[in-house]
Image (tube, rainbow, N blue to C red):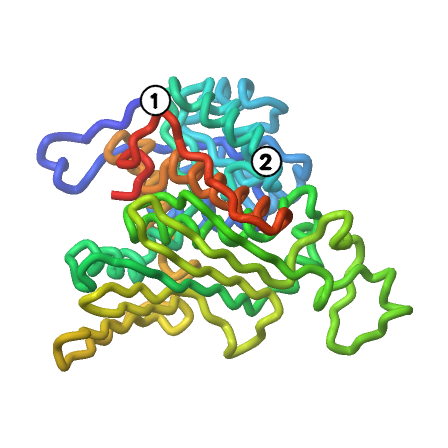
């Protein structure tokens, strides 16, 4: 990796100076396009995409600025990508390929921006855990919720003891755009692995982050095929309250859920309840949590951009309003800035690979629990201290 140096001592307080920052991309779809071409370029104006692995060459060239579109080199392997002189790599493929490419990048030692979920099977997650134990590769996992200003403020209040010891959390995600998980490529259960892995990976992560503790046990349930159904059944079941879509599967063959819920236990003894619903619309959108302790109750909602702290033993109620309405509630910009600093060697990741894996293990346990109808233990990272999982 090429080095980034201060221009001179007088400029040091302005941050790191670089002539450019060259990255390689793997799967430049809608999500990674946003992160690279909007967020990362804002954090580093001299960033350029110089190499890519993507089957849709035309779409990649169309997404890039004209000069880069003409010069970008298309390759077939991570080894070739690294050989193209890149300073870092960003992975935004379909979900079931995240782990494979991440492990390939681990061999190179290059900084990595990795989309979530970082794995969709236990086998892939365990292989990643092994692959990243001895690598120098620094990873920023795409967990913008934990990086959002509102979540960071909530965590600070919890850390400061506003509730005493947090004992319980109730979290919800009422998704107003749930159709996307049935009318686009997300409908492929073999790719997503279900919506605990696809959506709750964000929520389980920010809950563990706020409570400074991993999830250790899960009891979950799910509802499939009651609202969203396979299109071939539309003729025999023309229920106007149902949405029928092509090739979304069945409860028997595997399909994304209409809704799912989990009871969760944290290592520090706190308990939680989580629910995600995918048929909500318009003003029904909700995403956030209510934390409670003996001293108070703290609630927040990203869609409302606000938090409320109720003091149990004082006649006060504090309101916090976030003065922004940014994509992913402001977290994407924070992640991009952090990734640029990681590449420069100026910062550590605020959402590292261990946090990504711990979230995957919790989601896989929830998925298993919903299938079996019983509580399931969450695999814990064996060799990595929890401080390294970015919970502190």
Residue 91 spot, x, y in % from top left: 52, 36
| Among the two numbered marks 1 and 2 on one chain, the one whose residue lies closer to the N terminus | 1
Vertical relation: 6 (above or below) 44: above
- Determine whether label 1 and label 2 are within 8 Å by CB: no
Residue at (39%, 67%) from the top-left corner? Answer: 302
Residue 88 spot, x, y in % from top left: 42, 29
Residue 2: numbered disc: 1
Q: Quadrant of residue 26?
A: top right
Is residue 309 visible in the rendered image? The answer is yes
- Which residue position holds label 2? 121
236 vs 376, left or right, is right
Residue at (65%, 61%) from the top-left corner? Answer: 223
How crowded is the residue under tag 2: few (<14 C-alpha within 10 Å), some, or many (20+)?
A: some
Return the residue found at the far right.
235
Q: Quadrant of residue 191?
A: top right
Quadrant into which the N terminus falls? top left
Foreground: disc 1 or disc 2:
2
Quadrant into which the C terminus falls? top left
Residue 65 spot, x, y in % from top left: 51, 45
Vertical relation: 112 (above or below) 286: above
């Amino acid at each position: 990796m090429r080095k980034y140096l201060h221009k001179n001592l007088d400029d040091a307080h302005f941050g790191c100076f670089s002539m450019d920052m060259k990255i390689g991309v793997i799967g430049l779809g809608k999500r990674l396009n946003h992160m690279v071409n909007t967020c990362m370029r804002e954090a580093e104006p001299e960033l350029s995409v110089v190499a890519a692995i993507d089957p849709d060459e035309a779409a990649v060239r169309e997404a890039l600025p004209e000069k880069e579109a003409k010069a970008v080199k298309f390759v077939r392997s991570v080894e070739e990508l690294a050989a193209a002189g890149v300073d870092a790599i960003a992975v935004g493929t379909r979900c079931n390929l995240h782990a494979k490419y991440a492990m390939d990048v681990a061999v190179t030692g290059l900084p990595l921006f990795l989309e979530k979920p970082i794995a969709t099977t236990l086998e892939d997650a365990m292989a990643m855990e092994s692959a990243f134990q001895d690598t120098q590769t620094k990873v920023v996992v795409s967990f913008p919720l934990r990086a959002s200003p509102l979540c960071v403020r909530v965590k600070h209040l919890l850390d400061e003891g506003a509730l005493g010891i947090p004992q319980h959390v109730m979290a919800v995600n009422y998704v107003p755009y749930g159709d996307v998980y049935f009318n686009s490529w997300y409908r492929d259960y073999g790719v997503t692995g279900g919506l605990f892995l696809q959506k709750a990976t964000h929520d389980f992560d920010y809950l563990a982050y706020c409570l400074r503790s991993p999830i250790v046990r899960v009891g979950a349930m799910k509802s499939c095929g009651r609202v969203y159904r396979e299109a071939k059944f539309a003729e025999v079941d023309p229920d106007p309250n149902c949405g029928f879509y092509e090739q979304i599967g069945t409860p028997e063959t595997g399909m994304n859920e209409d809704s799912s819920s989990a009871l969760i236990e944290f290592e520090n003894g706190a308990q939680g309840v989580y629910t995600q619903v995918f048929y909500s619309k318009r003003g029904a959108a909700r995403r956030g949590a209510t934390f409670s302790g003996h001293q108070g109750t703290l609630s927040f909602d990203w869609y409302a951009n606000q938090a409320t702290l109720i003091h149990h033993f004082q006649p006060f109620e504090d309101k916090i309003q976030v003065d922004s309405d940014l994509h992913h509630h402001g977290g994407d910009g924070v992640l991009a800035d952090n990734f640029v600093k990681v590449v420069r060697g100026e910062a550590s990741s605020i959402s590292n690979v261990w946090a990504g894996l711990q979230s995957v293990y919790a989601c896989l346990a929830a998925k298993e629990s919903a299938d079996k109808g019983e509580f399931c233990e969450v695999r814990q990272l064996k060799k990595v201290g929890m401080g390294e999982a970015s919970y502190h």
